[in-house]
Image (tube, rainbow, N blue to C red):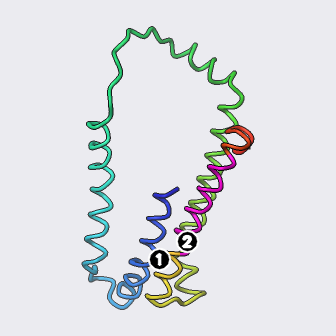
Amino acid sequence: MVGYAVITAFSMVILTEVFDKIQTNPENIPPEFLYSVIIFGILPVVLYYLASFLMATEPHFKIESNIIQNLKTIIKNKNYILVTIMIGLASVAWIMVGSLMLQYIVVVLIFDFMTNIIASVIFIIGILTFLYIWRRLVHKLGKKRSLL
């Protein structure tokens, strides 16, 4: 969710300025857009490898695994199936909101650069506040009841 907040802030602050420049001259790619795309393309790969090298390793045990038996166990676990469906539906909702947010900001709200920054900060604070409230609900109600 924090990653989505960063991407949304990026699209609200950087891409709205780039959107105007691209519409005036579609053949010229603005450097701030090019550099940010390169950075956001390299950053996940670097952070993934960094996390994989710094992560503590567990002792290696011989595991006899049967894919059919594992699949049967997963299908019998109703909580896992419900949480997986919930995460899938939430991802669809976030993608729908994220894909339309930039157009809504540019076309309907007609935000300038400073208003984009203010809206991005409010959005990130809202997400972090929601995460804090959700964490307290998990401690109070438990994981299952707070998710479902």
* Residue at left offset 32%, top offset 26%: 57
Residue range highlighted in magenta: 122-137
Q: Which corner quadrant holds the C terminus?
A: top right
User: Residue 32, how many percent across, how many down?
Assistant: 28, 77
In the drawing, does residue 75 fall left or right of residue 95?
A: right
Give me the residue at 47% from left, 12% from top.
65
Whether 123 is drawn above or below 90: the answer is below
Query: Residue at image x 49%, y 60%?
Result: 4
Element under label 2? Answer: helix
Residue 125 lies in the magenta stretch: yes
Q: Quadrant of residue 114 in the image?
A: bottom left
The part of the image, by quadrant, that contains residue 28 is bottom left
Can you give x and y, in whole percent of width and height, for residue 54 in the image? Answer: 28, 37
CB within 8 Å, label 1 to label 2:
yes
Nearest to the observer: residue 6 or residue 98: 6
Which residue type does callout 1 highlight? Answer: Met
Looking at the image, residue 46 sits to the left or right of residue 13; the answer is: left
Is 27 a magenta residue?
no
Where is residue 78 shown, x and y percent of the image? 72, 28
Q: Which residue is mark 1?
A: 12
Residue at image coords 69%, 21%:
76
Q: Which mark is residue 47?
A: none
Question: Which label sits in the foreground, 1 or 2?
Answer: 2
Q: Which mark is residue 123?
A: 2
**Location of residue 84 with respect to 21 vertically, above or below:** above
For mark 1, give the secondary structure.
helix
Give the distance between the C-alpha atoms of the residues marked 1 and 2, in whole angstroms.
10 Å
Q: Is residue 112 above or below residue 6?
A: below
